[in-house]
Image: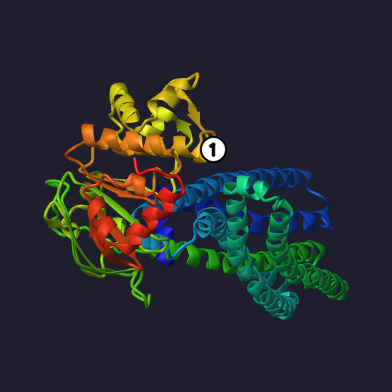
Amino acid sequence: MLKRLFGCVREYKKYAVYTLIFMVVEVIIDCLLPFIAAKVINNLQSEAGVDMGYIIKIGLILILMALISLAMGALAAMTAAKASAGFAKNLRHDIFENVQTYSFENIDKFSSASLVTRMTTDVANVQMSFMMLIRIAVRAPLMLIFSIVMAFIMGGWLASSFVILIPILAGGLLLIAKNAMPAFRRVFKKYDKLNESIEENVRAARVVKGFSREEYEKKKFGKAADEIQNDFTKAERIVALNSPIMQFCVYFNMIFVMIVGSMLAIKSGGTTINVGEMSAMLTYGMQILMNLMMLSMIYVMLTMSMESMKRIYEVLSEKTVLDNPKDPEYEVKDGSIEFKDVSFKYSAKAKKYALSDIDVKIESGMTVGIIGGTGSSKSSLVQLIPRLYDVTEGSVKVGGIDVRKYDIEALRSSVAMVLQKNLLFSGTINENLRWGNPNATDEEIREACRLAQADDFVMSFPDGYETKIEQGGTNVSGGQKQRLCIARALLKKPKILILDDSTSAVDTKTDALIRAGFKEYIPETTKIIIAQRIASVSDADLIIVMDNGKIADMGNHEKLLKTSDIYREVYEQQTNGGEDDE
């Protein structure tokens, strides 16, 4: 896992190496400063008198060393920021790129809110940990080791106080970190719920207001936020114990060095230890204890980030279940489709099949209607054609070739789908339509819109095709959105066009005009129309009636009225309700 994640550093490795070098230089200088300062103090107490030339010389050296140390710290901060920010950028890129390869089955494993959390909060945690690793995780251990060595050089056995304090402080800090970790781990899972609440509320703002459920949504969001707050508060309370333990060790060390050191200095007349060495001991003691605390904080941060690393690695290591064959077919000959002995379930663990025993043959250029009740697996059936899912049993052929033998991109380029949930992206109408064909001319765009009965309303806008679409297409009606999505699909010039209940928001007259346009302008394209209205499929060459994941009946409108109880019942309900079958 670590190898995969830190492999994302890539071109920013040099900045990480620069940071390590700058840190080593800074640590060496910081450890030498108290040692040299002790020499100055001893010179001030010298019986031979104060050598001002020596004091000035050493003072200038100390100032120069301090400036170099400051420069090294600043440079390390800059290079560490570049390395960690670059690492996070590459990590997000790799996550996003891998998600784009997912099949629908892979996407079903992760909620959209969870993916957002992993690409934002989790990546930010890992980025912070990486910065700490190349800065503090290098500086603190080196500073600790050098300070202990220098303390023994300067104070002799007086430095043995650290032998007592270090295990006490290290044990206490590790115990604190260990007890705080479960709360930190719970927080990340609750972040998913919080983001999910936000995402649902923003997307469904109109529904929330329409049902006056603002207070309910506030309570729902507040509950998720309170749970995160409680876990963080519990963890922070435990981590806050770092400070009193640290202060106890610092003050104990100061008192021990000052009392015992002073007694030794007085009794020995400064031969065993002197004031300068005592001063250095106090400084080294502070450095040792501070760096121990920093190491404990690194431990806390790394443990927190380990959970984030696992969540990110899950997304990075997820492999699409739909692979290209070794020698794929790149050309789809025509729009003919054949389902042969097809059965399908959404995952290997699923007990029930979504589709069973599907056998149907569709000639290229046919118009096929599919009707059925909610949950009859109409959408599941058509999603097998562009290989959004793979069949569990049997085969699906397009252009006479099993879809699993095609290059996935080539297959999907020949199939245009307008799904139930029509989605437009922020940008102009032109930009949205060119998703279907980036190289489409303005005339081709207008022709596609005329076929989809969208040109009139687009031209009614002051800016026409340059009208800005807000995120999610919230500034156009449901029917307008559907027609723009149909036009976008037509610009692909597909061999197969699938409309998954994508004219439900338009009136029957507009629906009939769209279908008439299809017959006239794209006669060679196979058209599959999933609909709830009989009027939308009554003139189809073939109508498939789905029931409970199986094909209940097939035929044209007249035949099904005579032979299919399901079809006849739906037809009578709709026509008796005043809807004609035009």
Residue in front for this viewpoint, 307 or 445: 445
Badge 1 is on which residue? 474
Badge 1 marks a residue whose secondary structure is loop
**How far across and down, in percent of the image, does residue 169 sit?**
72, 75
In the displayed structure, 39 sits above or below 263; it is: above
Q: Is residue 398 shown to the viewer in this render?
A: yes
Question: At x 40% / y 48%, what residue is drawn?
Answer: 575
**How far across and down, in percent of the image, does residue 356 sit?**
28, 70
Picture quarter containing residue 146? Answer: bottom right
Question: At x 26% / y 51%, what residue is drawn?
Answer: 557
Residue in front for this viewpoint, 570 or 35: 570
Image quarter hosting the N terminus:
bottom left
Is 28 situated left or right of 428 in this image?
right
In the displayed structure, 25 sits above or below 471; it is: below
Picture quarter containing residue 162? Answer: bottom right
**How far across and down, in percent of the image, does residue 16 sit?**
48, 52
In the displayed structure, 269 sits above or below 457; it is: below
